[in-house]
Image (cartoon, helix red, strand yellow):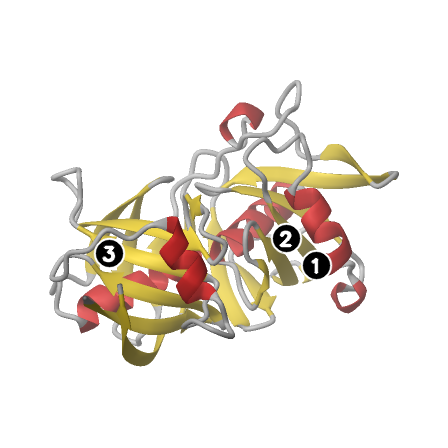
Amino acid sequence: MLLRFTKMHGLGNDFMVIDLISQHAHIQPKHARQWGDRHTGVGFDQLLLVEPPHDPDVDFRYRIFNSDGSEVEQCGNGARCFARFVLDKRLTTKRRIRVETKGGVIELNIRADGQIGVDMGPPRLVPSEIPFQADAEALSYPLKVDGQQLEIAAISMGNPHAVLRVDDLDKAPVHELGPRIEHHPRFPQRVNAGFLQVVDRQHARLRVWERGAGETQACGTGACAAAVAAIRRGWMDSPVQIDLPGGRLSIEWAGPGQPVMMTGPAVRVYEGQVRL
């Protein structure tokens, strides 16, 4: 069978989006690996599946597969593309939609200026909820990697993040430390590794090594986690602007127990079909 899809990106973090409401198919991890290959497939960081909700109080269900076939809980840039997709495809007429993900329910707001706001919910800071192996919750944790003692923040935005502050983002060893942090045994479900350079109280730069995808042009949940880490440590004040290789995200967080609000663009690239 032929399956329609849309190629999209949020600040260069790119996605293959498939409507499984008007189309019916059983997508497996092997399909994500096949289509995700940038030489022989469509090529993407993540595959996004639009499905009917399990919960009658939400509008859609949203599933996310990395290009290596692993399913993940959350993706902030993907959430914005998801919102743009369901509106453009007339799967909804709502400008504010609630979406069920593996990491919990999120709320998406499609603004008149084309920007999309996402209520990512409160960050999870308790180690067992991230999950991260630590005796108690702390602002930062020592992490030994290849004989180096790093200082990280550990935060879940529906998916786990380790945030490491660096002085010069351009010289940060993202491709050396990223995979080692991703697979560190203290993160039993692996982790996304963020490298954060604080520019001033409301402006920072960020690169993210994502689980199962490597370094991406942007990571929405990574930007949220980095903002939370910086605000908790007293380095920055909300709202903050996070510059990633693909562009800028605006993040607001009022403090513990409060939701993280992310705003940024979502762009449709092209439509296509694949044979399943």
Q: Earlier in the sequence, mark 2 or mark 1?
A: 1
Callout 3: SS: strand
From the image, tell me which residue sits under label 3.
50
Q: Quadrant of residue 35?
A: bottom left
Q: Label 3 sits on what residue type?
A: Val
Extreme top residue here?
135
Contact, mark 2 vs mark 1 (Cβ under 8 Å): yes
**Quadrant of the snapshot with the N terminus:** bottom left
> In the rendered view, does 204 fall on the left or right side of 239?
right
From the image, tell me which residue sits under label 2.
236
Q: Which mark is residue 198?
A: 1
Callout 2: SS: loop
Residue count near mark 1 (Cα–Cα under 10 Å), binned few <14, some 14–19, many ≥20: many
Residue count near mark 2 (Cα–Cα under 10 Å), binned few <14, some 14–19, many ≥20: many
Q: Residue at x 64, y 61 (%)?
A: 206
- Residues under labels 2 and 1: Cα distance? 8 Å
Task: From this view, report whether residue 97 is shown above or below residue 184.
Answer: below
Q: Label 2 sits on what residue type?
A: Met
Of 256 and 82, nearer the camera is: 82
> In the rendered view, does 269 fall on the left or right side of 203?
left
Q: Which mark is residue 34?
A: none
Mark 2 or 1: in front is 1
**Quadrant of the snapshot with the C terminus:** bottom left
Q: Quadrant of residue 172?
A: bottom right
The picture places residue 115, in percent across and down from the top left corner, at: 35, 71
Q: Label 1 sits on what residue type?
A: Val
